[in-house]
Amino acid sequence: MVSDPRQLFRLVFHFQKWALRFLALLFCLALLLLLRRFYRANTDLVPERGGTYIEGSVSQFQPLNPWFTITNNVNRDIVSLVFSGLLRYNPETKKIEDDLATLAVSRDGRSYTLTLKENILWHDSTPEQPHPVTPEDVLFTFQTIQSPDFPNSLLRENFRGVKVEMIDARTVRFVLDEPYSFFASNLTLGLLPKNAFEGVPIRKIDQTLDFGLKPVGAGPYAFKSLVQTDLSTEVTLERFSRPIDPDYFIKRIVFRIFPEYPTLLADIRNLDGVRLVPRNDKGEPIVPRRFVAINYTLPQYVALFFNLGHPFLQDSKLRLGLQLGTNKQAIVDALGESVIVDTPLLELDTTDWRYHFDAMAAQGALFESKWNLPEKVRLQRLLEIRETNDTGALHADPIVLLDTGAALTLTGSLAQASAGSTVNGMPIAVHPASSGSWIVALSTTGGTGSLRLGQNLVQLMDPKGNVIDTVYVWRSANTREFRRASAEQLLVQQFIDSRAGLLPAGERITVQDLAVEQGMLRRRTANDKSDIRVNEKGERLTLRLLTSASPQTYRKTAEQIREQWAALGVDVVLDIPDTRAAFEKKLISRDYDILLFGQSLLDNLDSYPYWHSDGIQHLDEAPTGLRIDAYNFSQYSSFKADALLTQIRQTFNEAERQEALSELRKALAEDVPAVFLYSPLYTFAYHQDVHDVSIGHPSLHSDRFLTLHKWYILQERRFKPGKSWWSFVPWLLSSQ
């Protein structure tokens, strides 16, 4: 016990002091928690300007120039941000819209007038020396392309027959020879500054490395630096403010280009995005879990193009049979793909129209073609022999077992063959034991009328040498061979009885139940593979399929086709050149029966270059005269299709376009110039710390950056409208 009251008072005071301190601490903690709760309840996370987005890709860096950008290369991604065109594609609306200029199209669809927006500057502008985008730059960009010396002939074709003229200080006009409703998409090409190429000959304009390694554009991001390391090439872009842009949040974009994907994965912790992510055997993207994967398709398709110049493939029934016998679902499953395509007209909704895989229908179409399986040819021949032998004045078993030295005795009626008639040159004699009959013996030792081993044509002729009747006799001296031939004859009889409905359903057979072995029919087994079809000339149905070694999915697809068509009786020989140059040489010269390849429609979805007869390669021209822009890989020509394709190009009426597209779809379906397989699936991945990423409906991989103004990395909290820290007390009272 405490005896001194003063000591007790000190103890109580000391306890109260610490108790007050503890309560004060509890009060502060509670206040902080309430303030935090109030702050989170009355604020929103909003994007904050700034931050750097780093994207990795597997590719090879090349000089940056919109005129010479390789399709599907990372360079196109960079160019799409550094340069801008007069117009731009909007992946959200899937339409061509204004960019650096506003567009007006004449009523006849031949005149495109573009007015440059105000205060658009090139990236090399300074406050002291502004460098505005002018009509002279527009004329330079497109008139350079039109020059015969321009080193990109494919791009030049887009502006053939187009007149470019300057109207005033901000306006240019493009005048076409004839209406072309898709022309606006050509004006999305990035503009280039005229002064950057002064003194450079047009034929050498692709060699301007100074510009390509430090480009000047008018896009939303300006080129900052190019750094080469042992592991990658790094291109840095920085935001370039333009009066026409929405608010961009990301300040800096870094493209890190790696030689291979494993090297990219080694640096994945430093990346915010990955371009063209590969997938494993299960179709899953190969990226860490903290990355969000977006699968998308482009307006592309992979198809089997029939070379209609090949005599075999001019048989429409054969083409239809090959189409029906192609299991597209099995192909996309094997490749890890998912989007099956049935028409090259990708803007159409074809969910209610599809050529499904149908093996029986395929066999039916091939049955009606001029190509038949050997078992059908053999069966048909045996049926003809049986019918020939069973009718007329001369009768004989279709098969006989006769050793050399034996003779085959034939008899008949003298009413049908008078004295002096012959059988295979041997005179007939009056039958000694049968009144009104004749008899003849055909030897097997050689000489007149002798029966050879194998098939023999035996003819009964009158005294004047006219053929009265004919039979076929197959002779063998081998017992085992004769038993096989006898079994074959039993199968023929079973087939005849099956066709006539004389047998129970379980005992009936069709030609599909038969196989040919060593030239004779037998019952087909589960292990039998289909033989190769033949035509009336005995030619085997062998087709050479050409494809590219890259991408690897083409080889896998070709192997699938070879296996599937083998079941149809079609022999497919794969031709996969080792180099791109060797493949392109065969492609341009149409050195193939079937081509497995892809085509891209880009944003305008214009099928004219691929299916109009203008795109046919004229092989009678000298090799140097062959066109690299002849994209009609099937050598397809149709007056109806040509007219519809032209109408689609020239009409600005959407209802008319849709009607023409529907008719064109039917024409292509009836003619079967190709088998359309699938649209490749691509994957783009971004880190979960990158927000509001959407890519819409891109026409190119680079189109994902057309929504870049929505992306952001940094965030901050802002009070909701009408809220501030002064709202804490009312909020506290209202929450009681």
Image (spheres, grey):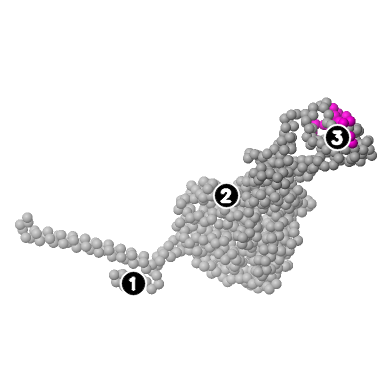
Residue that mark 1 sits on: 727
Q: Dot 2 lies on which element? A: helix
Q: Residue at x 57, y 49 (%)?
A: 333
Residue that mark 2 sits on: 333
Nearer to us in this view, 483 or 289: 483
- The C terminus: image quadrant: bottom left
Mark 2 → mark 1, Cα distance in angstroms: 59 Å
Q: How many callouts does the rendering have?
A: 3
Residue that mark 3 sits on: 411
Nearer to us in this view, 593 or 287: 593
Q: Quadrant of residue 348?
A: bottom right
Q: Residue at x 69, y 60 (%)?
A: 666
Which residue type does callout 2 highlight? Asp
Q: Which residues are magenta?
A: 432-455
Q: Is residue 141 visible?
A: no
Q: Are marks 2 and 1 in contact (CB under 8 Å)?
A: no
Mark 3 → mark 1, Cα distance in angstroms: 123 Å
Q: Earlier in the sequence, mark 2 or mark 1?
A: 2
* Whole-percent x, y for residue 320 in the image: 70, 52
